[in-house]
Amino acid sequence: MKAAPDAGTPRFFQDPAIDRLAASVLQLASEVWVLNERFAAMQAVADEKGVITAAELAQFQFAGPEDAAMSEARVAFIRRVLGPLNAPD
Amino acid sequence: MDRRAIQSLHPMLVPAQTGDYARELFWDSVTMYLESEVRPGLRSVYEKEIQPDLKQALGREPDRKEIAAAMRQHDAGRWWYLQRTESQREGSDATRAVVERQLPLLIERAKASGNGPGSLTLNPDLVLPAYLDIDIHLQKGGYYGTADSRDTLLTGAVYDRGLTLGRMGAQGWLNDDAGLSLAAWVKEIYPDLKPKRILEMGCTIGHTLTAFKQAFPDAEVHGIDVAAPALRYGFARAASMGVEVHFSQQNAEHTNFADGSFDLVFSRILLHETSAEAVPKIFAECHRLLRPGGVMFHSDAPQFDELDPYAQSLRDWDATVNNEPFMDGYYAMPLEQAFVAAGFAADKTFRAKPVSRRLVEAGIDPKRSRTTGGRYFLAGAVKA
């Protein structure tokens, strides 16, 4: 995934800000859908195996290295989603 | 420290549900991304794309207001303002939603902290200063609270949770880095002061004061604020940590303490939230409250005369969007003149930049803090 449009990326609107906004929204849509599908798959497997309840899921907290990895992934996610908005023309 | 440990630092912090916490952390990370990765790059946008034309048009170097106005008209500036406003509002709302759900439990825990150590004295008749009738930091009701939250501890809990989880330890895990750093500075610079009574004006939840009590365990430590929800929460928080602090709901412009009754009076990021009329009164009140030889200091972001015009212009978002309208007026104020007008001698005034202790010790990137390069700024005076 790219943090910002490459140089020479086609522009479709007179105001390049609109292109950047559209890129950001699409990145977000992509990430949200991936998350949706992964979460649905996890729930389906958990239900099938009877290993996790909705309450257990709501109370779960990441800890230790998993928490650190999640923080790193969150920052990378933000860079991907918001990068196009903040890229120089 | 992982997220479970962070949310269990003291009894007044309660772990949120996974999704809610993910939302809080997401908006905090957006804020940090905008502040530490995007904003530094805006200076070169200004210097390359705006400054040359602006300077030519004006026939001189632009001032902070002209720079800010030009940045707001540039796409890079517009996007930054838009995103930063969203991150501020959404982050605050995310934490407020968590605290609202936890409120019954927090009230129960506050009651369990009993009668101290320390004390809490509220004044329901206190008139809210007109300058606080605004949603400071884009929070509904500011820290004073809205009509439906004024009698609770909600805004205090939102403030603590937001600072603790939001900055991920950049202000100390107990939000006490400022307190520890400033108290250490007092000890170093005024080794003979040995304060017996200490007052913090605008103490909110007492996170700075608890560090002063720990640094000066024999001192009687007082904190005042106009926001009852912050004081209620602060008292419960300090009591749950076993730290003796006396909280009272008072306006720093005129308190009920006796003349000359304190050795040390200070504030931390209070004055820019007040007004041009209030600040001289607050300085005069500090002078009245100090005994001869006592020390007053006010720690805030650096005054404009410490910064170049572009750095000055960065406060524009806070002042015009984040509802801190006196930011521009306060940071432009010639503080030393105001200290003298309040009764302090000109040769007894000072400025200092104490180093952030925890930031350095914990190896936290200073960019994650609002302090500049791991230092605090303060200005003050010694009473003759």
Image (cartoon, coloured by chain):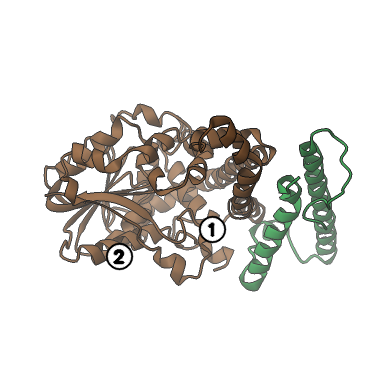
Who comes first in sequence, dot 2 or dot 1? 2
Residue A89 image-quadrant placement: top right
**Residue B243 shows up from this direction:** no
The chain in brown: B
Establish if B362 lies above or below B84: below
In the displayed structure image, the side of residue B171 where residue A48 appears, left or right? right
Q: Chain of mark 2?
A: B
Query: Which of B21/B114 is in front?
Result: B21
Q: Secondary structure at mark 1?
A: helix
Residue B259 at x, y = what percent?
11, 42
Q: Indicate the position of residue A7 as horizontal and vertical percent values.
A: 83, 51
Label 2 and label 1: CA atoms lie apart by: 22 Å
Using the image as rendered, state which of residue B41 and residue A43 is in the foreground: B41
- Residue type pointed to by label 2: Ala
Q: Residues within 10 Å of mark 2 (few under 14, many from 20)?
A: many
The picture quadrant where one finds residue B151 is top left
* Whether residue B296 is situated above or below residue B133 in the rendered picture: below
Looking at the picture, which amino acid does disc 1 mark?
Arg
Q: Colour of chain A?
A: green
Looking at the image, residue B10 lies above or below residue B348: below
Q: Nearer the viewer, residue B378 or B21?
A: B378
Q: Position of residue B207 (x, y in %)?
A: 37, 55
Identified at 73% across, 45% down, the residue is A85
Image point (38%, 63%), residue name = B355
Mark number, residue B368: 1
Residue indicated by mark 2: B184
